Image: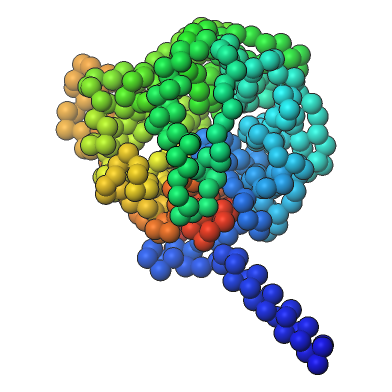
């Protein structure tokens, strides 16, 4: 009898555990696309949308877990722990495929195959780094010259359980950005040599430098933003690592025009960004060619606007992660993972205009819905990325409760 009871208890626990786990694979009934769960451990997440998470050979994806960093083999889906303990991940190196991260004021790199870890550099006081350049010789970040920030309040909304009431002691993102911009703290945009630890200041000011991203192909080209409420800042800029070539990427032409969430194309030729003319009314995905300064704007509908966009490795497709009920496009934005196919407006000028290269090339995006995120809580941003083989779009979601890493197949079977 005791054995029988033990078997029943074991079956009950197994069924309960399986019931709490999201499905491993399914076909989205609203889109017909196959979705797979890549992570095993609840609380696992893919990286921020512009952080390179893939090894140069395209075989592995780096993710964060509650206990450290792990890789997922994109062919076998085998998960392997590579870094133990919570760290601040920076990027997977474009050259070596090592993962760079910070812990206790020091930057480290870990080989994803051998697990060998080496110390890269100790950060100066009040410094942080956010990017590694294409040949992995430089780190880039900021030195904060202002007073120490006040203690953070209780758990931020992004980490709260889906459906939980918002903590009134924690400021909204809009409030936080207004307060931080108003502080006008002295900052330095800087680089650190990964070989010698030498610190070099590229820019000083009281603007809020953020969203720092090296070009994926040019080791000496750095993109950054003037952070803050987007309607109050000239946001996207580039600068050379010798401190020259400071360039504003987008100049606003109307009040309440906003642009941001900038990111590089994989070939390092194009900078892409979310553009609204004006805010919450007319939506574009815009591009800037860093070599020629030529521009293209692709229009999309309000319902297709996304918190973040991304571009495929070959530059032919785009993805978006939709938006929640409180987003900039609300009401009316959609809670979906989107695939976009770009089309240009037909040029009827026959190329005879003398200033043709100076004019914006207009286009539009044709959207396809891939995953229904109606049950996703957008306090967690999905952050879409294309896999190197362009067969899948990876994102994170809490649509089943705990956060997991998922991928949706681009082509229907």
Report the number of numbered marks: 0
**Horizontal relation, residue 271 to residue 114: left or right:** left
Q: Does residue 182 appear in this view?
A: yes
Q: Nearer the viewer, residue 64 or 134?
A: 64
| 84 is higher (above) or lower (below) than 263 | below
Give the colouring mode of the picture. Answer: rainbow
Q: Nearer the viewer, residue 256 or 115?
A: 256
Picture coordinates of residue 372, whole percent (x, y): 40, 59
Residue extending furthest toward the front: 169
| 107 is higher (above) or lower (below) than 377 | above
- Where's the N terminus, which quadrant? bottom right
Q: Residue 104 lies in what quarter of the image?
A: top right
Residue extending furthest toward the left: 348
Q: Residue at x 33, y 51 (%)?
A: 334
Picture coordinates of residue 81, whole percent (x, y): 75, 48
Q: Residue at x 67, y 47 (%)?
A: 66
**Horizontal relation, residue 358 to residue 222: left or right:** left
Q: Residue at x 63, y 56 (%)?
A: 42
Picture coordinates of residue 151, whole percent (x, y): 59, 27
Q: Residue 182 lies in what quarter of the image?
A: top left
Q: Does residue 94 appear in this view?
A: no
Picture coordinates of residue 5, whole percent (x, y): 76, 86
Q: Residue at x 44, y 28 (%)?
A: 176
């Amino acid at each position: 009898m005791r054995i029988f009871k033990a078997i029943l208890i074991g079956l009950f626990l197994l069924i309960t555990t399986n019931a709490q786990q999201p499905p491993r694979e399914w076909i989205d009934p609203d889109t017909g696309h196959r979705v797979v769960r890549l992570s095993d451990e609840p609380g696992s997440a893919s990286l921020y949308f512009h952080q390179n998470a893939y090894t140069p050979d395209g075989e592995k994806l780096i993710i964060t877990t509650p206990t450290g960093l792990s890789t997922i083999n994109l062919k076998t889906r085998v998960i392997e722990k590579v870094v133990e303990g919570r760290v601040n991940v920076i990027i997977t190196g474009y050259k070596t495929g090592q993962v760079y991260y910070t812990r206790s004021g020091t930057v480290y790199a870990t080989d994803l195959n051998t697990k060998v870890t080496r110390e890269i550099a100790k950060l100066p006081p009040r410094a942080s780094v956010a990017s590694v350049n294409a040949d992995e010789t430089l780190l880039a970040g900021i030195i904060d010259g202002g007073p120490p920030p006040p203690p953070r309040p209780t758990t931020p909304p992004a980490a709260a359980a889906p459906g939980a009431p918002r903590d009134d002691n924690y400021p909204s993102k809009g409030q936080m950005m207004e307060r931080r911009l108003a502080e006008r703290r002295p900052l330095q945009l800087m680089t650190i040599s990964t070989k010698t630890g030498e610190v070099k200041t590229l820019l000083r000011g009281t603007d809020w430098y953020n969203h720092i991203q090296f070009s994926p192909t040019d080791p000496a080209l750095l993109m950054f933003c003037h952070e803050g409420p987007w309607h109050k800042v000239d946001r996207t800029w580039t600068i050379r690592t010798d401190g020259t070539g400071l360039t504003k990427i987008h100049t606003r032409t109307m009040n309440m025009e906003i642009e941001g969430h900038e990111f590089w194309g994989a070939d390092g030729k194009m900078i892409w960004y979310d553009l609204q003319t004006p805010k919450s009314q007319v939506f574009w995905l815009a591009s800037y060619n860093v070599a020629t300064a030529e521009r293209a704007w692709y229009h999309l509908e309000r319902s297709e606007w996304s918190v973040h966009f991304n571009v495929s490795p070959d530059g032919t497709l785009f993805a978006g992660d939709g938006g929640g009920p409180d987003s900039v496009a609300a009401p009316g934005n959609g809670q979906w993972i989107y695939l976009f196919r770009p089309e240009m407006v037909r040029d009827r000028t026959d190329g005879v205009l003398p200033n043709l290269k100076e004019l914006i090339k207009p286009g539009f995006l044709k959207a396809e819905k891939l995953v229904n995120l109606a049950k996703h809580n957008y306090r967690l941003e999905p952050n879409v990325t294309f896999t190197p083989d362009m067969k899948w779009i990876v994102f994170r979601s809490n649509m089943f409760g705990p956060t997991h890493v998922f991928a949706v197949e681009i082509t229907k079977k």
